[in-house]
Amino acid sequence: MGTVDNAVIGGDIIAILAQQAIRQTILFSAVASLQAFQPPVVFIAGVPVSARMQEVYQYRAEVTRYPIESASLASDHVILYPIEIELTAEAANWYPQMPGYALNLLEQMWKSRNMLTLITTHKQVQNMVLREFRAENEAPIWGKLSFHAVFQQIPLVVIQAQNSPPSQTGGSSSANPAVNNGGQTPQTPTTQQQGNFNLPASTAVG
């Protein structure tokens, strides 16, 4: 009949208790760090979201499909389209009201039709307008919103005023449509009118 060493049994019990204590300490530390966790908040065009997912820069041009003269400039037969920037982001439901708040801000921006200066991670583009956006919500994380917004640049043309020489009768020849080039100079929108929404490179709050 075998014998039982009480010292060995006691050592095993102490080892088990020590492992339990270590696991309990790790668990308490995890719970404490979870309570101190602050969900990140970043901004896209002034709209608070939880994470930026993608930035797409699109440059397009319409190039002629027909033959041109060898002495002509090729650039005269290429039409540049406005720059488009597509931004994708997610607004989590860590803050229950943030997804709806972000949706309302994007809707107001779209309805206002105002130009703004869009500052992304890599570029700053002026005279941008929110052309379209969509918001999606799907399971299993019900409550969050995924945003996909497309901004398009509006090219501005400044019309130079030209003074017409006086006519022989002493009056102005501005009534002559062949001479009058117009004197209207579009006003550049101020910073306040543009909105000047920012997309910082890193604005996470933790």
Image (spheres, grey):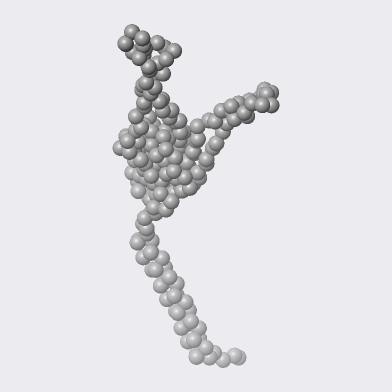
- In the foreground, 152 or 32: 152
Q: Can residue 61 be seen in this view?
A: yes
* Residue 49 rendering spot, x and y as whole percentages: 40, 46
Q: In which quarter of the image is residue 195?
A: top left
Residue that protrudes farthest toward the top in the picture: 169
Q: Nearer the viewer, residue 138 or 45?
A: 45
Quadrant for the N terminus in the image: bottom right
Q: Where is residue 19 in the image (x, y as percent from the top left)?
A: 47, 77
The residue located at (39%, 39%) in the rendering is 117
Q: Which residue lies furthest to the front in this view?
A: 168
Q: In which quarter of the image is residue 132?
A: top left
* 180 displayed left or right of 71: left
Left or right: 72 in relation to 99 = right
**Residue 135 visible to the viewer:** no
The residue located at (48%, 81%) in the rendering is 15
Q: In this view, does 44 lie above or below 115?
A: below
Assign the C terminus to one quadrant of the image. bottom left
The one of 38 and 192 positioned closer to us in this rendering: 192
Q: In the image, residue 26 lies at what x, y percent? A: 43, 70
- Percent across and percent down for residue 139 are 47, 42
Residue sitting at 53 percent across and 91 percent down?
5
Total marks placed: 0
Between 73 and 149, the residue placed more toward the observer is 73
Which residue is depicted at the point 41% across and 12% down?
177
